[in-house]
Image (cartoon, rainbow, N blue to C red):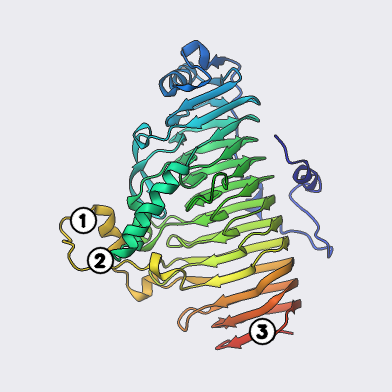
Amino acid sequence: MKNYFILFALSVWMTGLSTNAHGREIPDFFWMRKVGAMSYPVQQAVYNVTDYGAKGDALSMNTTAIQKAIDAAEQAGGGTVVFHPGIYLTGSLFVGNNVNLHISKGVTLIGSQDIGDYKKIDTRVAGIEMEWPSALINIIGKKNAAISGDGVINGRGKVFWDKYWNMREDYEAKGLRWIVDYDCERPRGILIAECENVTVRDIVLYQPGFWSLHILYSKHITIDGIIISNNIEGHGPSTDGIDIDSSEYILVQNANINCNDDNFCLKAGRDSDGLRVNRPCQYVVIRDCVAGSGGGMFTCGSETSGGIRNIVAYRMKGVGTKCGLRFKSTCQRGGVIEDIYLYDIEMIGVERPFVVDLNWNPAYSISKLPKGYDMEKIPVYWSKMLESVSLEQGTPVFRNVTLDNVTASNARTCMNVVGIANSKIENFILRNVCIEGDKAGKIIWAKDWKLDDVQIKAHDELILEYNENVDMP
């Protein structure tokens, strides 16, 4: 399936440069020519899962049969794994080196609703390294692999969403809001971890139990032409779209995402564990993408500990998204978020088009063990979350961010930028920015902003407090 509107937008891309509506070129940073997969599985051999015992009847469990086909392809040096049209029930699958898992039109993979069908692995979840169930489809420690086709991957995650909401109510009553997201095990849709040269192309992904597509500790990854639609049978908690986590040289293009959390999100670990790992998210291009419902069209954070830098996003459109351009962290995270370039961004009906928050969601972000718990008996990942971080290490820095040719209409609050006294939001450049909305919003604790042709059209005045060299026209 293709989004032809997005593909048309791609046609204006030429040799690493693009011209925006005001005649300026999108920067051609040297590293932009290196993003994305450098190779693709080209082995001619075809392995049909039916030959290994798979049945597309929506009832038979096919994990073993499909995995046998994948393993046979990898052991033979590579190939394409294919399906006859049908609906295939499966647990976690693991794609191998030089293998293309091709899910063609007429094929649907449906995820098991039994968490036991998702093998436990060592991974990172929401910024913490821990044991957690594998995803529905996994590519881990592999090179030159792909997931392709116009077919559907349906995680059938509502059972896991319901489990989470039930647990959350109980945990909040006990003062444990900060840990429920980790205690409630839910499978991701697709996990690409510790990989190189992997492509995910054209597939449709529905209803994961947790994050939709997680790129972790990987490099040279291409995500192209995919559709993610998670708000089926309700709004799943933490059903992010694409999470790029401590990875580099990543290309995301022509994607269309409706979810119930951040749509396109950059992450780099959280708190003491993220500072220990200290791996940045860097050299990422996101272009020609559409965000519908979701928490943030383009988001940096809140897991910022390893740093997020050298990111370019352009020709993006948000329609009805909660937040548009979103930067979030807390004073436990640390990390430097810098050299972010956002061009040709259009937002329609986005509630909060521009948000910077250094004290994001304290109930979730601040870990505190209630009375009655023994530190010697709690899980290891609880201890990681509770480990203290010094103010110096834990204070995040947001600087050197450029917004160029950005428009937003029918917003609720145009801007909500709040730094802190010891970490001001520094050196943001806003050029050709026009935001129309009900409330103007605020800029607090910012420093050395450069503003050129910036218009905030609202029913009240923008609040400016504790700033240095931030003069709105």
The earlier-in-sequence mark between 1 and 2 is: 2
Q: Is residue 318 above or below residue 53?
A: below
221 sits left or right of 224 in the view: left
**Contact between labelled residues 2 and 1, with CB atoms less than 8 Å apart:** yes
Residue 293 in the image: above or below residue 135: below
Q: Amino acid at mark 1?
A: Ile
Which residue is disc 1 drawn over? Answer: 378
Q: Which residue is mark 3?
A: 462
Q: Position of residue 195 (x, y in %)?
A: 48, 38
Looking at the image, which residue is at 83% across and 65% down? 22
The residue carrying mark 2 is 369
The image position of residue 356, as x and y in percent, is: 56, 71
* Structural distance between the alpha carbons of marks 3 and 1: 47 Å
**In the depicted structure, whether residue 254 falls above or below residue 43:** below
**CA gap, disc 3 and disc 2:** 39 Å
Q: Is residue 114 above or below residue 184?
A: above
The quarter of the displayed image where residue 305 is located: bottom left
Residue 408, quarter of the rendered image: bottom right
Asked which secondary structure carries label 2, the reply is loop
